Image (cartoon, rainbow, N blue to C red):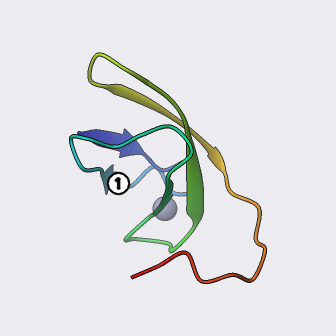
Amino acid sequence: MKAKCLECEGEIKLPDDVVEGEIVSCPDCGADFEVIKVSSGKVELRAAEMVGEDWGE
Ligand SMILES: [Zn+2]
């Protein structure tokens, strides 16, 4: 599954089992986005709040 970065329009690859609420990072510009909607192969993102926490590996 893929999504387009809202910052640089780069391609963000997502796992096929991505779920709403998941945080993803753009490999090109490093921006973090939250998955807000997943429906039939399409994913909607919004800029994630930077909270200074470690979101995991
Ligand atoms: Zn980007």
Q: Is residue 35 left or right of residue 26?
A: right
Q: Is residue 53 left or right of residue 25?
A: right
Q: Is 27 in front, or is 14?
A: 14
Does 12 sit above or below residue 30? above
Residue that appears at 44% across and 64% down: 26
Residue 33 falls left or right of residue 25: right
Q: Quadrant of residue 48?
A: bottom right
Tell me where residue 19 sits by quadrant. top left
Which image quarter holds the C terminus? bottom left
Q: Residue at the location (24% across, 50% down)?
A: 15
In which quadrant will I find the N terminus?
top left
List the residue tagged with mark 1: 12
The picture quadrant where one finds residue 32 is bottom right
Under circle 1, the secondary element is: strand
**Residue 50, percent across and down?**
76, 71
Identified by mark 1, the residue type is Ile
Q: Determine if the C-beta at disc 1 is less than 8 A from ligand 1.
A: yes
Provide residue 18's location: percent of width, then percent of height: 34, 43
The residue located at (39%, 55%) in the rendering is 10
Q: Nearer the viewer, residue 41 or 12?
A: 41
Q: What number of labels is visible?
A: 1
* Farthest-out residue, top: 40
Q: Nearer the viewer, residue 28 or 56?
A: 56
Badge 1, how many Cα within 10 Å: few under 14, some, many 20+? some
Compared to 32, does 55 lie above or below? below
